[in-house]
Structures are given as structure tokens and as C-alpha cells.
Image (tube, rainbow, N blue to C red):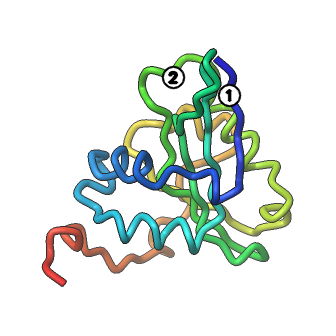
Amino acid sequence: MDYQITTDKNDMDIDAIHDYLSHSYWAESVPKHVVAKAIENSLCFGVLCTDVDGNEKQVGFARLITDTATFAYLADVYILEEHRGNGLSKELMTAIIGHPQLQGLRRIMLATRDAHGLYEQFGFTELTDQNMFMQLWTPDVYHQTS
């Protein structure tokens, strides 16, 4: 199988991304229109796989919410389980950290429950002053009626 990483939003399979995210611990039940809007307004990285028959499939994704000058928030990072173990997470993070629009930022943040080891390899650390950060959190927003 041949893998590639792209930032071309035309190559993003919104159905596949939505399917994964809507079952993830961080975005469970997220509506498809929310995923589409998030992709539209973010710097996105898709991990695509081409099989021996030439069929292309979205097998990974990440997006950054950023002003491209001072700050970025890394979100929705995943590699499909059947494609893990091929170094794709590291390749994806290398592409993100090296992306021209993300150079010179003062801070890149993320939240993770279980991938600290991956992100530490790229210089991420725990918050140094947790008292400095605040949040407005609505964990059940996807379950509310519009």
C-alpha cells in the first residue's frame, strides 16, 4: 500500500472523517455538518492510502485551528486502527510540525487522553501553568437540539 499526506481539502473524504470522529471519545455523535464546517475553517492534513488496484481511501486525519501567526490548536488526530504500526502517526506529526504556515507560532496546544508518548516525541509537554488556562466547555453540545 502506498500512503500520502495531503493538505488539499478536495482530497478529504468528509464521510470517512465524520464516521471516525462521530465514534471517537472526543467527538462522539458530532453531526456531519459540524465536521464539514470544521474542515472548511481549519488547516487540514489527510492521510490517504492507495491500494494495489489504485483505489484511494482516507485512513488518517488531523486539523489545526490557527491564525498562522501566533497560535494553533491541534485537533481530531487519528489513524485508522488497521493502518497503525506503519509509522503514519509520526509521518503525520512531522508534516504538521514542518508545515510552512505553522512556523514561528508561539504556542500549539492539543488535548489527548492516550497519546502523550507520540506528542512528546515532537516537543509537546504538559501545561507549565495550568492556572493560566481556562475553558468554556459544553460536553453535550452534540446531543442538544438545534
| Amino acid type shown at disc 2 | His
Question: Residue at point 37% right, 44% down?
Answer: 113
- Image point (70%, 78%), residue name: 67
Determine the CA span between mark 1 and mark 2: 10 Å
Q: Secondary structure at mark 1?
A: strand
Residue 116 located left or right of residue 89? left
| 127 w.r.t. 70: above or below | above
The residue that appears at 71% across and 54% down in the rendered structure is: 7
- Name the residue that disc number 1 marks: 3
Residue at the (54%, 34%) spot, across then down: 57
Q: Position of residue 77 (x, y in %)?
A: 51, 46
Q: Does residue 118 appear to the left or right of 101 in the view shown? A: left
| Dot in front, 1 or 2 | 1
Earlier-in-chain disc, 1 versus 2: 1
Q: Secondary structure at mark 2?
A: helix
* Residues under numbered marks 1 and 2 in contact, where contact means CB atoms less than 8 Å apart: yes
Outermost residue on the front side: it is 53
Which quadrant of the figure has residue 50? top right
